[in-house]
Image: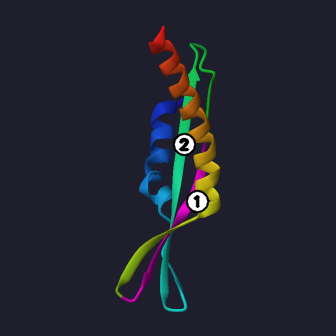
């Protein structure tokens, strides 16, 4: 039986920058490069009898795109995705901060 960790490592070698930045698209003379926040994780294991398994998963949040018009290059955010990420972050960060302040007062 092959080593599961090595097999997962070989399969995930193409992740990283390729999953965060999409393929360049040309639309009416405008170059668009999509950008996303990605996360992935894998795990695996086996026992002495040779029974093994593994799995993985991940998610991706589209953040926006780099837009190039002639010599002008700028990032245009995906406002809906930014709000979807920012609202829970602000909620949990605020709760954590209030608990830290409350603990420091005691």
Placement of 64 over or under 51, stated as above or below:
below
User: Does 19 lie within the magenta span?
Assistant: no
Residue depicted at x 47% and y 13%: 105
Q: Which mark is residue 40?
A: 2
**Is any part of residue 35 visible from this angle?**
yes
Q: Residue farthest to the bottom?
A: 28
Residue depicted at x 63% and y 21%: 51
Foreground pick, 39 / 78: 78
Q: Residue farthest to the left?
A: 71
Q: Residues within 10 Å of mark 2 (few under 14, many from 20)?
A: few
Which coloring applies here?
rainbow
Residue depicted at x 54% and y 42%: 40
* Mark 2 or 1: the one toward you: 1
Q: Secondary structure at mark 1?
A: strand
**Is any part of residue 56 visible from this angle?**
no
Q: Residues within 10 Å of mark 1 (few under 14, many from 20)?
A: some
In magenta, the rendered stretch is 58-70
Q: Secondary structure at mark 2?
A: strand
Give coordinates of residue 27: x percent, y percent.
Answer: 55, 86
Q: Are marks 2 and 1 in contact (CB under 8 Å)?
A: no
Q: Which mark is residue 42?
A: none
Quarter of the image that includes the N terminus: top right
Tell me the residue that label 1 is attached to. Answer: 62
Of callouts 2 and 1, the N-terminal one = 2
């Amino acid at each position: 039986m092959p080593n599961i960790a090595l097999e997962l490592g070989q399969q995930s070698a193409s992740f990283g920058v390729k999953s965060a930045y999409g393929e360049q698209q040309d639309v009416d003379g405008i170059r668009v490069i999509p950008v996303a926040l990605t996360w992935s994780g894998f795990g695996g294991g086996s026992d002495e009898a040779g029974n093994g398994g593994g799995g993985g998963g991940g998610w991706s949040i589209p953040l926006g795109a780099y837009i190039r018009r002639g010599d002008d290059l700028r990032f245009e955010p995906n406002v809906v995705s930014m709000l979807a990420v920012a609202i829970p972050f602000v909620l949990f960060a605020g709760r954590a901060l209030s608990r830290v302040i409350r603990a420091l007062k005691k």
